[in-house]
Image (cartoon, coloured by chain):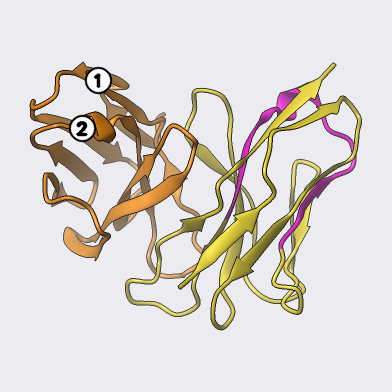
Amino acid sequence: GNSVTQMEGPVTLSEEAFLTINCTYTATGYPSLFWYVQYPGEGLQLLLKATKADDKGSNKGFEATYRKETTSFHLEKGSVQVSDSAVYFCALIPSGGGSNYKLTFGKGTLLTVNP
Amino acid sequence: DTAVSQTPKYLVTQMGNDKSIKCEQNLGHDTMYWYKQDSKKFLKIMFSYNNKELIINETVPNRFSPKSPDKAHLNLHINSLELGDSAVYFCASSRRDRVANEQFFGPGTRLTVL
């Protein structure tokens, strides 16, 4: 079946530090890949996505590149801010249609950024 | 304007009770979802409806019954609540014309069963 594995947290960084959250997936074909972010007490918001190999998704200074050869979609940001503190979820939707629109999530990584 | 709204935000109840959570979206989407987030933040889909038709039904106890009166609403009714049902339940919606369409999530309903 489909699965997403992301690095265990929590991750604690100082402001302006470099962030990497690793994400690898298992799925047949070419799934669509997503990073969602959940701020404290809120629902999830889409941060970025990529739909085919070598695509780079980017938003708010965050980037992730769809690597088919390593089945990875690592999230990076060059300089984190306190306001980036949240739980980050890597997720996929399998290729194809039908009932295959369900998001499969990783377990989430809690990021805390200290001033 | 709220895109995906859920009521109530918090729900505290006793074991054995029956409760409902309501979800509404004003985005004009045709597909809605229920997800469960456990205490360790793990998210798992429960159900999905497209144009009022059930299209995803994961392995969920039949005490959980979703109902979609129209495309904009998806409610979740839970019978005979158990301690293990305590979680945050998220509603989401999307358009189904493309696989990679963003799912928009509601703020969640925190259910606590005592």
Which residue sits at x=45%, y=52%?
A: B103
Badge 2: chain ID: B
Q: Helix, strand or loop at disc 1?
A: strand
* In magenta stretch: residue A75: yes
Which of A31 and B42 lies nearest the eye of the viewer? Answer: B42
Give the residue number, with chain letter if any, for mark 2.
B21
* In magenta stretch: residue A65: no
- Chain in orange? B
How many numbered marks are there? 2
Give the residue number, with chain letter if any, for mark 1.
B11
Image height of B55 relative to B72, above or below: below
Q: Inspect this view and state whether residue A39 appears.
A: yes
Q: Helix, strand or loop at disc 2?
A: strand
Query: From which residue to which does the magenta span run?
Result: A73-90
Residue A107: x and y in percent read 55, 47
Residue B76: x and y in percent read 18, 41
Q: Earlier in the sequence, mark 2 or mark 1?
A: 1
- Horizontally, residue A85 falls left or right of residue B100, namely right
Residue A62: x and y in percent read 77, 46
Q: Are marks 2 and 1 in contact (CB under 8 Å)?
A: yes
Which residue sits at x=83%, y=33%?
A: A80
Marks 2 and 1 sit apart, C-alpha to C-alpha, by 9 Å
Image height of B49 relative to A30, above or below: above
Crowdedness near tag 1: few (<14), some (14–19) or many (≥20) residues, C-alpha within 10 Å: some
